[in-house]
Amino acid sequence: MKKMLFTCILMCHAFCSAQITIFEDFERPGLLGDAISIYGWTPLRIGSTSCTGTRAYKSFLNTFGGQTTTLIYTTNHSNGAELKYSFKYFVESMANYSSGGNITTSYSLDGGTSWTDLGSPITFLVPIAGAAIPCTLVSGTIPAGNIPTGSTFKFRFMVKNTVVANNPAYPYQTVGIDDIKLEQIPTGIPSCLNTQVYFTNPKNPLKTDIQWYPAKGATGYYISLGTTPGGTDVINNLDIGNTTHHFISTLQHSIQYFVTITPYNSFGNASCTLTSDFITDKLLCPENLLPSGNIASTINGFKWDPVSDAAGYKITVGTTPQGNDILNNVDVGNVTTFHPSAPLLFNTQYYFTVKTYNASGESFGCATKSFKTQIPCAPLAFHSPNGNVVSSLTPKLSWGTKDFVAPTGGFRLSLGKYIGSNSTSDVLDNLDVGYVTNYQLTSSLEPDTNYFYSASGYNYQTEQFNNCYGVFFTTPGVLSTSEIQKDNDNILIYPNPTKDFINVHSKKKIKNVNLVDFSGKKLLEFKWENNKIDLRDLSKGGYILQIIFSDNSVSNKTITRE
């Protein structure tokens, strides 16, 4: 007698609080594709068309040979009461073929050896490009006593094709099933036996899905989430209904979270809870930051590798470790390169840090990289002349800065003959030309001669003159006709030829005048005054009058001394 009583107590503990109660909407994040596993169900295909939400079970049938697909749910939670079932089905319309067949629902109590059909099969037919069958509700009841307490109960959906493909190139039809409910009336509060919490992407604060196995007798669940055991500072006892998952996308990085699930039904809350915890990952810092070390010329901006789940990046730049005197935590957006608007200084040590951020916070503890800019002449690009024979004995020398590293003081220019493999500075010796990128020579160079010039940038704080590179050019052998005859400045010269004096008038202001022979050699430099030049000491013959204006432009005029 005592043994029988003990057995009855055990059975009551196992089954009195149990009942079949599920609601499956297939909306768990990440469920999409073939052979998906969901607790209690046979492997299934999940598609993106649905009745509610964004997912549903998809029966994808080959229309040759009467193909059949099945979806089966298994449980041993029956309490012997009646079971109400319901679901929705839909049939898609296809442009190239028709869909036809039937859906049968049935259940088994012997492991699937035999099946009891629930009513007549549901037939459907959608012609080629015909109207689709929208989500249609089907419901019914399995009477009390038909599913014994504690029995292994299987509920089956079977979809069968009955139409032979009328377009062999498209031999498929698609039937969907969604929002499945199986419900028995509870007889006591829920139990927590044989269930537990598990997670999908538990370490990703933007994609954490909390899931659990169904509790016996539960018709719904409360969920709490906190940063301490049993805590509710994130979610406070939220009623999520009869679903066994909850998706969260607003957690923080590098935090331990504690989950509490409380099953309930019409009799009240379970006397137990389902608990678990997880720690979200740290938001990663960008890696492979550039530039680093010593840079001999210039930098093409700051660069780093992208970080998964980043919404953007913030950069700090300073001239001391942990300094921010150049850029202070500037949000540069979701990019992996950045060019500061203000130029960096030459010969200067810089330190920079790049942090990642998203809706869940910012990365922390990111490493600081350093680099040093070097010689200020290195970022220069020489435009002209550059390795060519120039057309004038008074060429304009030009250069420019590359990228965004530029001097803050100005440039110093050197120019001289290139003899053998050695350069000189016999024409211009480290001349400070200010913050300009070109310089017009006012004195003629020697014809048919190799010259070398270089420009060195300098800062107010530091200067660098050595190791600067430059370019070569060659002067012409004789002055070109275009130089001799050029007259774009309305210059009036008279009398020409002359025996003594020559008058020069121009709308532009004249700075000085040189006398050059036809080989390009400078003979005289006249002090400019009263618009008159004294030629009485010259030998008879032809000469070139080189007129230099205040803007350093030059005009050459042919004159004759009689």
Image (tube, rainbow, N blue to C red):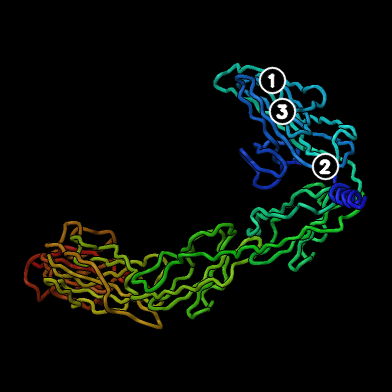
Q: Nearer the viewer, residue 307 or 102?
A: 102
Mark 1 residue element: strand
Q: Quadrant of residue 556?
A: bottom left
Spot occupied by residue 337 in the image (x, y as percentages of width and height): 48, 61
Query: Which amino acid lies under the numbered mark 2 shown in the image of this protein?
Result: Gly
| Viewport quadrant of the C terminus | bottom left
Q: Of marks 3 and 1, which one's residue comes earlier in the chain?
A: 1
Spot occupied by residue 443 in the image (x, y as percentages of width and height): 21, 72
How many angstroms separate mark 3 from mark 1 (CA)?
Answer: 14 Å
Report crowding for label 1: few under 14, some 14 to 19, many 20 or more residues within 10 A (C-alpha). Answer: many
Q: Of marks 2 and 1, which one's residue comes earlier in the chain?
A: 1
x 35%, y 81%: residue: 463
x 63%, y 58%: residue: 204
- The numbered disc on residue 100 is 1
Select label 2 or label 3 by which is in front.
2
Report crowding for label 2: few under 14, some 14 to 19, many 20 or more residues within 10 A (C-alpha). Answer: some
- The numbered disc on residue 158 is 3
Q: Quadrant of residue 486?
A: bottom left
Do the CB atoms of the residues marked 2 and 1 lie less than 8 Å apart?
Answer: no
x 76%, y 60%: residue: 275
Do the CB atoms of the residues marked 3 and 1 lie less than 8 Å apart?
Answer: no
Observer able to see residue 15 = yes
Observer able to see residue 20 = no
